[in-house]
Structures are given as structure tokens and as C-alpha cells.
Image (cartoon, rainbow, N blue to C red):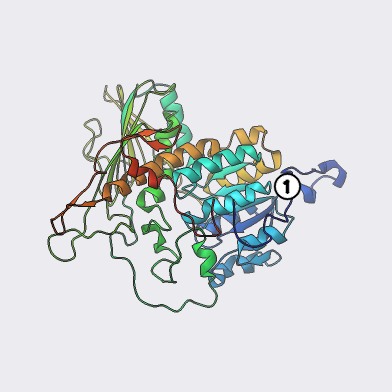
Amino acid sequence: MSISRRSFLGKSALAAGSFYIVPRHVLGKGYQAPSDKLNIAGVGINGKGLSDVNNAFNEGVNNIVALCDVDLTRAKPLFEKYAKAGQYQDWRVMLEKDKSIDAVTISTPDHNHAAIAMAAMQLGKHVYVQKPMSHNIFEARTMTEAARKYQVVSQMGNQGASSPGTQQIVKWIDQGLIGKVHTVNIWTNRPIWPQGIPVPTGQHAKPADIDWDVWLGPASLIDYNPAYHPFKWRGWWNFGTGALGDMGCHLIDGPFRALGLGYPTEVEASIGSVFISGNQPEYIPEGCPPSASIQLKFPASKKNKSAVTMNWTDGGLRGFHPDLIPANDPIGTADNSNGVVMIGTKGVLTHATYGLEPRIYLNNGDKIEMPKQEPNNLKEYGHQAMWAEACKAGFNSKEHKDLSSSFDYAGPLSETVLMGNLAIRSYTLRTPIQGQANRFTYPGRKKLIWDGQNMKITNFEDANQFVKREYRAGWKL
């Protein structure tokens, strides 16, 4: 990791990643030793960062000692709530100055996840990183290996992984209720932000309270534009991972976990087009498409013992009702906007986002339902709080092993999600046809064969440029 704040990491000693706990009996019943509390820093503290910090704080079970956000105006709610915490605009300064930090929550745009997490882990600090774990496959693999190397407790922010519904889905699959699963259909109504639009233009004055250089981080240097910050960055490859990156770790998690899937072996994409003028579709390789269809293929796993074809659609497109599910029954969410259907030899299993509302329809006509759950509550199934407790217990603890989305699991899941984006970007690659104006061939519009162990497409070399990114000078991973 090379991040160019001059003395950062160069002067910082590698932290040990463990600390002494004062026994409770020393202080007496009802008292909590200060060392029983985890010292947490938050980076990216508005939007999803609000709940990540608050839930890790866990109503005072832990300490919030430092907060960082490039946008000081959007940071105000948590700056004011945790007024005793150090306040920063540059996370590199925060990590360099505050030696009390034990663990860091990272809830920034996707393109900054890996840089911040790697720096924190190299200092021996535990990390909680929003989904997807990283911006690209190489980063996900690097972060997974780093968590083991530095022996830090890790968790990805796909909170549905800790929900009772997800636990029930795994149990039903383990019981063999729907037999061997061969097909999985997943869909989402995302993007709910602009995608498939021309690259933003125009000159815009940067607000004085935003550090745009730190917001850009490893991404290509461009001028400030309100079309990117604070939310619409998701639709641009320089920063985001599109609809698949936004919802894939939530929706793919159920089947990936329950079926014991690993790296896919094949991927193929098709994307929607946008026509603004004339009869040629817009060519916007910098941006994510308005809709996409992805097919991933997995070999049989120890748990499922059947090859699996996974079909993903976004942009509001979804697969059709399986015959076993009555026409008037919803699939996925109540409005059918997001969901998962697993099709097995004995029946089908469907569930909504975060593993909610799982139901089984068997070949014999029986229906199995889980008692209704509350929607995603404010404490998010204890996903952040359990991570904080595991941090206190340590890397080799049962608490860490029991986490639902440590990097050992979240890494391969994120790589699978990001593999779909590799296929999307390969689909848009084009080569001019010599002597024919505005005519092109598209060599990446085919099935891509993936060597997961070596992170390499074996039948189309140009696709491998999307395994990792080009890093801005001074931010190389």
C-alpha cells in the first residue's frame, strides 16, 4: 500500500491487534472496565455510515474515538452526536494521529474501500467495510489475504447475512428440502440513480467544506461535479460498481452461502442500450448501463452436489414466475422489485432482500413459510455489534469464526459480484472496422471462462484489464 501523505505508515509502527481486558470483578458488579470497550473510528459517516457507526457504538457498549468524512457539512450529525471524538477530513491524518483506534468502520464510496481498509489492517486495526468489499476483484482478493496476514477481525456490511431469514434459508437447504439446486434467478429494481447517461460536463465550484482530492482517492483525477457526490457516483466505473455492486452482495448472499458456492467458472453479460440521437446506441464506457443481464456458472459444491446456473437481471427486469409458485403469490419482495428464486429437484425457494420472507414451494404442492420477520430494523440484526464483540475477542476467537460475513466469506462473494461487472465492461469493448465509418466489432460479447484461483479470463485477454484498476499516482494498492 502506498498512499502519499508523507509520513503516513512510514512513521507508524504495526499495531499488535490485541489489548488487555481488565476483569469485571476488579471494578465491581455493574461496572464496565474502560478496556472492555472497543475504540472505534468511522470513515464516511453520513448515509450508510450513520447506522454503521451507531450500531458499532451499540448504545455505549463501545467508544467512538474518531470520525472522518471528506464532506464536513454531511458529517455534522455524527460530529455533534459524538462530540468528544476526534474530527477529521482526511482518513490518513486520522490513522496517523490517533493511536487509540482499535477498529475502523468504512462506509465510503466503493472506490475508496480497499485503500482505507488496507491501511487500517496494516496498522493492526480491525475493519468493517461496506458492501461490496472492494471496487474490483484484485482488491477483494488482496483484502482477504491481508486480513489473515495481519490477523484482524473483518466484516463486510451486507447486514442481511446476519438476519434470521438467511439462517433459515441455510437450514432449509442443509435439510435438503428442495433437493439439489440447479438454477438461481436473482433480480433488482436498481439502479435508482442515473445510469446509461452521458458523462457529466460543465464547470462547478467545489464547496469549501469538501476535500475533493481525498474523495477521489485512487480514482482518476477529474474536477468536482455535483453529479457524482454524494450519491450518484454509483453509476460511474471510476467510483462505483453499478446496480450489481449495490445489491449483489445482499441478494446473491443467500444462495452463495446456502449452496456453498465458490468462484464461478463462466460468466456472460448482455446490457441495455440508450438511444439519444440517431439509430446508433450511445457509447459510454465510463458509465454503468441502464440495465444488465448476467449469467454465472458454478461447479458442484460439497454442500449442493450439483452445478448451478445463476441468472442476474437489474434495471427492473426479472425472471418469470416458476410454475410451482401460484400466479398471485409474490416472488421476492411483496412488490416483486427485488428477490431470489432457487430452483431444485424437489421444489423452489424464494426470498426477499436481506433473506426476508423465505418460502418454499414443493413439487407435491406443500408450502413452507417462516414466521413473518420485521423489516430491516435500525440495529440491522446485530451485524455491526457482533463484529465489535468479535474484535474484542480477537482474530482466533469463536466470535470471529461465527461472524456471518468476515472477509474469508465476503471476499469470494464480492469477487463473484464483481465478476459480473467484468463481463459488463468486456461487453462494451469495441474495435473499429477498417474502412467503415461508425462500424465496430465487439469481441467481448461472448461467454468468458474464468480461472478463479489465478484471477484470469482465459479466453479473452482484453477482459483482464478489468480485474484491477489503474491507480492515481500516490494511491497505488
Name the quadrant containing residue 325: top left
Q: Where residue 72 sits in the image (x, y, percent)?
A: 57, 71
Q: Can you give x and y, in whole percent of width and height, for residue 238 in the image?
A: 41, 58
Residue at (24% x, 39% y) in the render: 446
> Residue flagged by tag 1: what amino acid is it?
Ala
Instruction: Identify which residue, 323 or 185, lies in the foreground.
Output: 185
Q: Position of residue 233 (x, y in %)?
A: 41, 61
Q: Residue at x 74, y 50 (%)?
A: 13
Residue at which label 1 appears? 15
Name the residue located 70 percent from the left edge and 39 percent from the top edge: 393
Query: Residue 100's x, y, as percent?
Result: 74, 55
- Badge 1 marks a residue whose secondary structure is loop
Crowding around mark 1 (Cα neighbors within 10 Å: few <14, some 14 to 19, many 20+) is: some
- The correct choice, above or below, for 450 with respect to 428 in the image is above
Along the line of sight, the residue nearer the viewer: 250 or 166: 250
Q: Toward the viewer: 124 or 104?
A: 124
In this rendering, is residue 298 above or below 92?
A: above
Q: Which residue is farthest right?
A: 26
Say if residue 370 shows up in the picture.
Answer: no
Front-lying residue, 469 or 82: 469
Does residue 49 lie above or below 420 as drawn? below
Q: What is the number of callouts on the image?
A: 1
Q: Is residue 291 visible?
A: yes
